[in-house]
Image: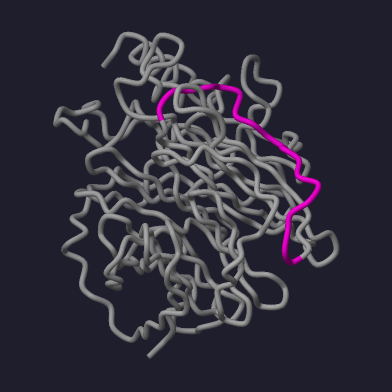
Amino acid sequence: MKPTALALFTALLLAGGCARADAPADAPKADAPAAAPIEAVDPSQAPEATGFRQTVLVRGLEHPWALAWLPDGDLLISERPGRLRVVRGGVLDPVPVAGVPEVLASGQGGLLDVALHPRFAENRLVYLTYAAGTPEANHTRLARARFDGRALSQLEVLYAVPQRKSGTQHFGSRLLWLPDGTLLLAIGDGGNPPLRLEGDLIREQAQNRGSALGKILRLSADGSPAPGNPFQGDGGALPELWSLGHRNIQGLAYDPLQDRVWASEHGARGGDELNLVSAGGNHGWPLVTHSREYFGPEITPRRSAPEMVDPRRVWTPAIAPSGLAVASGRVPQWRGDLFAGGLVSGDVRRLRIDGEGRVTAEERIPIGQRVRDVREGPDGFLYVLTDDARDGRLIRLEPG
């Protein structure tokens, strides 16, 4: 381990109970860490699920990234090259939404997540995340605008990651509204070696509380730091920080049955994680991880540590988890289950979860394309976006 990383790791251990602040009363409950460090599982050993019927609803999308339902049942779908599309009455409108901000459509960058304000029916506000800048100097932005059904207007940037990085990797960008009306925004660590920032490998920013990289942020609806965040008043820490030690979160989901937040994130070579996230948690990256460098060596020998939150599932080899949904119970046989998409595995993982947040079973639903997003629809069925340059698809999963 590099001297700077080792020093930081030691400091975190010495900090003990001071490393974590109390969560605000209205935040999702903070579950205790897993009783013991878990071992990675081989995703190829998961049995194939039965009792699911797949229906392709839309074809011909270009690198779709996220979807959101409008009150009338129509859908918004973001395409990474910089287009926002509408599915009207089950048919993809050939004309993209006007007024989308200019994006850096390079590498993993582009137009990323889309979410509606909880009171969208009243205010017509749509929230977007995207990569902005140049390949040499870029960052993640959060913006909102009013949507009239055809175009966006009154666009305003609500939040911009303060750090400017080179390379077009690890933007994170998933959005999640919490029941208290605050907004979680996941930000990636900035990229892989040899990328550097402030003299160190950029991934070390995930442990820097003065940086937004490698974090989940909790914001008010106007993009300002939400009141009651765990590191407010901690000298040098950004007031918007909610959790830290993340590599590249690509799935965020709220469990309304248990009042908790789940996140899925990419490892490097193996070590993909499913995490139960709460205010103030440090999830360890890159000081503790099951992941290895893409070129082979261990990133660190440590898989777990005191004051670090252990993952609830680790996949090695990687599935590249992207998109995450919790079944709310509208389909009774799925109640409380987690559904995680896999880019590399080309499937959706059904994970059975007990009341303590432990994974008790895993099944795979083969899709046959890279799965970018998984959401529960208003009807309780699951909706899947597949990532393809020419034939990205919207697929419905229902019992059958």
Q: Report if residue 162 lies within the magenta region.
A: yes
Q: Is residue 39 above or below residue 72?
A: above
Outermost residue on the right side: it is: 122
What is the x, y in percent for residue 153? Answer: 78, 51
Residue 75, image quadrant: bottom right
Q: In this view, which residue lies farthest toward the left?
A: 296
**Was residue 75 drawn as part of the magenta stretch in this picture?**
no
Q: Position of residue 396 (x, y in %)?
A: 45, 78
- What residue lies at 48% left-to-right and 71% top-to-bottom? 336
- In this view, the residue farthest toward the front is 95
Q: Residue at x 24, y 27 (%)?
A: 299
Lateral position of residue 95 relative to residue 50, left or right: right
Asked whether 379 or 255 is in front, the reply is 379
Q: Say which of 324 and 77 sits in front.
A: 77
Near-viewer residue (357 or 272) = 272
Tell me if 231 is positioned left or right of 227 in this view: left
Q: Position of residue 375 (x, y in %)?
A: 51, 67
| Residue positioned 61% across, 61% down in the render | 96
- Rendered image quadrant of residue 279: top right
Tell me if residue 110 comes above or below residue 304 in the rendering: below
Q: Identify the magenta region.
A: 149-167
Q: x, y (%) of residue 30?
A: 56, 47
Whether residue 340 is situated above or below residue 328 in the rendered picture: above
